[in-house]
Image (cartoon, rainbow, N blue to C red):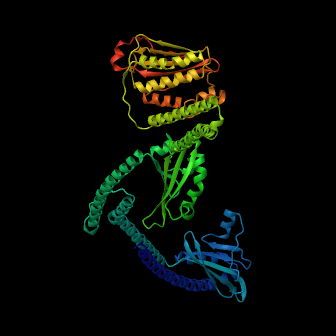
């Protein structure tokens, strides 16, 4: 509409100005003819006066002629050199007196070539356009100078042309004022609702379904706005339903992710972390870190990053063949020193779109197999140790029995008895090894033991009676120091008896003649400020060879024997491992204090039976009695 209005207005204005210019050109032509004729007439009358130098009559004639018409703007007389000697409305004397300069007439450049004919030109002055007519003054064939007169344009034509121009400009301005007003009205009535609709559509596309348009319009535009509001309301209700469903599904997914035992990490196609569960945070040491939407390779542990960088880039680039072949998951076993020497199994799974052609993400499943690896290593070591322990006595038994079988008649009674005694000892060694292995296996299984109130003095006294003869033969003194008011403890009698047997047996084994082995049992003071169980502490001390500090950490491991480093005493290396497992069944720990050449003290705490807690002395402050050898 604006373009059409512009074209029409420019066309009409152009036609109008063309007509005005045509009229002005005709007026100029008439002015030119009038000026030339008038100039010839004046020159014919003024030439004799100029020739006679009768300037008085010339001035009177010129004034009379100038005063009789309004068409003449000025009259100038110049000699043959162009110097002005008289002019109306000013004269030569006025020019010299007022301006103090000699005035010359500026003639056209080609006037000298055509001075026999009048020369006409137009020029623009502050008072309007003037037609200049230059007429040569000749008298009797003599060139006397030039008469220049200025002709005013026809006032009627000027007025009409100015009026026409002003009307045209007014019409042009009026048209554009109407166009502007129409545009403003259009913006207020049509464009504004359309802009509101455009903004509303953009907000709807951006997900803002609460957008509404409230404009009091009728007709088709009002119906369009009404339909838009209804559409936005329906989309809003659909969005709320979808959000509730998505929120529920997300909550289920997050609950599932947080409860599974394995670690789970979800990456997008740019390898940024989109989802991670607590297990993966713990394994990768991400607790307290904001890793969501961050590049995974910048936050993975170095050992994991070293092995997963290449396959992750291959998957992200769309090359699945080298990483997983025809499968969708690839497995990696990685040791992570940064996470407490964990060993993990990592599965990389590609997440594809429905067409299974484009990658949408990468799922990383992390399984902590540290315990599994340790158990496999322990199992292998256990089988190796048992095989080694079984091979030696079996080899000895077989060797002596073969010797007796082949050369029994050639051997003396003393030699045969010695061979049989050695075979008997090796058989006892095998029996102890098998029994210890069975005991350890039974303790490490899920077998349930019955725990009840046990008088701790009874298994201690039974153990001392059992080893009294062995101690006497080695010249070792067995001592017991049991509090007379010691309460009952919660435990299993047979298991406690096995603990005392192993500890006292080891103490006798590693104590030289003249040494001492003591068992002490006493209740620990109860602190009334703490809600904790009452305990009885049991200590087994000896004055034996002691244990090196580097061996104290591994002393409770299976098949670990101190005698391998200090002497050649025999043993299965399972006794203290059995003791530790029995104490774990009693929900307590084994402790030791040892010094090489001074002795060793093993000690543990047992929970007092609830029936005897009230009889214990209450201490004013918590204290712990330190075991000494």
Q: In which quarter of the image is the C terminus?
A: top right
Residue 622 seen from this side: no
Residue in the foreground of this view, choosing between 560 and 127: 560
Q: How many badges with numbers are in the image?
A: 0
Locate the N terminus by quadrant.
bottom left
Vertical order, 399 against 92 (above or below): above
Residue 536, image x and y in percent?
Answer: 43, 18
The residue at the far right in this view is 81
Residue nearest the observer in this picture, 406 or 422? 406
Q: Position of residue 83 (x, y in %)?
A: 72, 74
Choose between 92 and 414: the one closer to the eye: 414
| Quadrant hosting residue 261 | top left
Q: Which residue lies most toward the front here?
A: 409
Instruction: Judge whether 328 appears above or below 576 on screen.
Output: below
Looking at the picture, does residue 401 appear above or below residue 65? Answer: above
- x and y percentages locating residue 547 in the rendered image: 61, 24
For residue 621, say whether it is visible.
yes
Q: Where is residue 588 in the image (x, y as percent from the top left)?
A: 45, 26
> For residue 138, which quarter of the picture?
bottom right
Q: Which residue is depicted at the point 55% across and 17% down?
A: 471
Q: Which of 292 and 499 is in front in this view?
A: 499
192 relative to 618, above or below:
below
User: In the shown orientation, is residue 450 left or right of residue 478?
Assistant: left
């Amino acid at each position: 509409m604006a373009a059409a209005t512009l074209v029409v207005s420019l066309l009409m204005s152009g036609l109008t100005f063309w007509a005005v210019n045509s009229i002005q050109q005709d007026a100029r032509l008439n002015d030119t003819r009038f000026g030339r004729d008038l100039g010839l007439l004046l020159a014919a009358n003024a030439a004799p006066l100029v020739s006679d130098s009768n300037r008085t009559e010339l001035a009177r004639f010129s004034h009379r002629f100038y005063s009789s018409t309004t068409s003449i703007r000025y009259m100038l007389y110049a000699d043959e050199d162009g110097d002005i000697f008289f002019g109306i409305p000013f004269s030569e004397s006025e020019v010299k007196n007022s301006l103090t300069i000699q005035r010359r007439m500026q003639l056209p450049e080609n006037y000298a070539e055509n001075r026999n004919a009048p020369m006409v030109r137009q020029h623009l002055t502050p008072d309007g356009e003037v037609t200049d007519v230059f007429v040569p003054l000749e008298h009797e064939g003599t060139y006397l100078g030039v008469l220049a007169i200025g002709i005013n344009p026809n006032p009627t034509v000027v007025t009409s042309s100015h009026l026409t121009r002003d009307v045209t400009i007014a019409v042009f301005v009026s048209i554009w004022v109407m166009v502007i007003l129409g545009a403003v009205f259009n913006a207020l009535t049509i464009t504004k609702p359309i802009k509101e609709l455009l903004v509303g559509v953009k907000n709807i596309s951006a997900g803002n379904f609460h957008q509404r348009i409230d404009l009091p319009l009728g007709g088709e535009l009002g119906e369009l706005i009404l339909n838009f509001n209804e559409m936005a309301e329906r989309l809003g209700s659909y969005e709320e339903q979808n959000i509730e469903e998505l929120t529920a599904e997300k909550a289920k997914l997050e609950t599932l992710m947080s409860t599974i035992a394995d670690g789970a990490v979800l990456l997008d196609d740019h390898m940024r972390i989109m989802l991670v569960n607590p297990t993966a945070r713990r394994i990768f040491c991400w607790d307290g870190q904001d890793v969501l939407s961050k590049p995974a390779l910048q936050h993975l542990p170095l050992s994991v990053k070293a092995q997963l960088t290449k396959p992750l880039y291959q998957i992200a680039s769309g090359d699945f063949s080298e990483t997983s072949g025809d499968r969708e998951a690839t497995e990696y076993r990685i040791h992570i020193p940064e996470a407490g020497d964990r060993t993990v199994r990592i599965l990389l799974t590609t997440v594809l779109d429905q067409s299974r052609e484009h990658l949408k993400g990468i799922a990383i499943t992390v399984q902590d197999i540290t315990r599994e690896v340790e158990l496999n290593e322990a199992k292998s070591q256990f089988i190796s140790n048992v095989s080694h322990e079984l091979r030696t006595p079996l080899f000895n038994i077989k060797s002596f029995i073969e010797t007796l079988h082949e050369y029994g008649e050639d051997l003396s009674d003393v030699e045969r008895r010695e061979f049989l005694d050695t075979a008997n000892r090796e058989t006892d060694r095998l029996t102890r090894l098998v029994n210890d292995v069975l005991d350890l296996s039974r303790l490490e299984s899920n077998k349930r033991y019955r725990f009840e109130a046990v008088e701790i003095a009874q298994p201690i006294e039974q153990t001392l009676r059992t080893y009294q003869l062995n101690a006497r033969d080695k010249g070792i003194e067995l001592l017991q120091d049991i509090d007379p008011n010691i309460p009952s403890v919660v435990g299993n009698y047979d298991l406690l008896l096995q603990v005392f047997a192993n500890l006292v047996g080891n103490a006798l084994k590693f104590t030289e003649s003249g040494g001492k082995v003591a068992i002490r049992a006493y209740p620990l003071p109860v602190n009334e400020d703490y809600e904790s169980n009452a305990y009885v502490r049991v200590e087994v001390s000896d004055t034996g060879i002691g244990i090196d500090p580097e061996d104290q950490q591994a002393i409770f491991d299976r098949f670990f024997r101190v005698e391998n480093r200090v002497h050649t005493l025999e043993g299965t290396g399972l006794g203290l491992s059995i003791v530790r497992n029995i104490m774990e069944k009693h929900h307590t720990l084994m402790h030791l204090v040892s010094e090489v050449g001074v002795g060793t003290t093993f000690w543990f705490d047992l929970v007092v039976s609830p029936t005897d807690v009230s009889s214990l002395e209450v201490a004013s402050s918590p204290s712990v009695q330190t075991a000494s050898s």
